[in-house]
Amino acid sequence: MEKLKCKVCKIKVPIENYSLRLSNGKYIRYGKTCDECRKKINKQKTTTDEFRKKNRIKQNKYNHKRFFYSRATSMINRIKRCGENVPYTPMELAKYLAILWKKQNGECMLSGDKLTRENAHVDHIITKNNGGSNDFDNLRWVTKISNGIKNSLNDDELIEHIKKIYNKLVINSLN
């Protein structure tokens, strides 16, 4: 049985204890560090605060991009299921949604509440039921609650409905 000397632990270890890698269609051995030492080195690298901080930053950037892209693809799939033509790619819509989020300063256009990835929804200003389109200029970010309250109402109808509710509450509180 062939043994190689590990450059880290300086012990002759059987060749089977070295990882394989693919090179020119053939598997070859690493030959410098045994699997056990390589695992220890990798574990040390990944447990440092610097590594964790750098990895957290990378993960946040990825999640940020992924958030807009996943919203864009789900919107496009919904549009396609309705049998409508989609005038843009998921990447174009994702970029627009990110720009729109920034333009709105991460606030709901209806309530002014802070938007988070958990409560954010994309709303059609003029609803599809009222002849609205899927064009960029007909979209805005709102909270899940605001979107649920608005439902298929346009903004003027929503205001009238809220006024009725408010007046009803005021009358009931006086009694």
Image: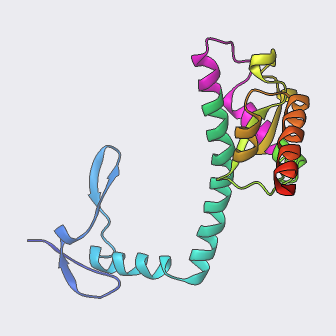
Query: Relative to 155, is 20 above or below?
Result: below
Residue 109 visible to the viewer: no
Determine which quarter of the picture holds residue 32: bottom left
Q: In which quarter of the image is residue 157?
A: top right
Q: Does the magenta stretch include residue 23?
A: no
Find the magenta span and give its range: 76-99
Q: Is 11 left, or right, of 38 in this rendering?
A: left
Image position, residue 86 (x, y; %): 70, 18
Quarter of the rendering occupied by the N terminus: bottom left
Q: Residue at x 65, y 47 (%)?
A: 67
Q: In this view, does 145 lie above or below 16?
A: above
Q: Where is residue 147 in the image (x, y as percent from the top left)?
A: 73, 39
Query: Is 145 left, or right, of 46 in this rendering?
Result: right
Q: Residue at x 70, y 34 (%)?
A: 91
Q: Quadrant of residue 151?
A: top right
Looking at the image, which is closer to me, 110 or 21? 110
Q: Main secondary structure of the magenta part?
A: helix
Q: Tell me the residue at 32%/80% (across/down).
A: 37
Taking depth in this image into account, of 119 and 162 the one nearest to the observer is 162
Q: Where is residue 68 in the image (x, y as percent from the top left)?
A: 69, 43
84 magenta-colored: yes
Query: Quick one: 60 or 151, which is closer to the camera?
Result: 151
Instruction: Examine the rendering and report whether any part of residue 121 can be seen.
Output: yes
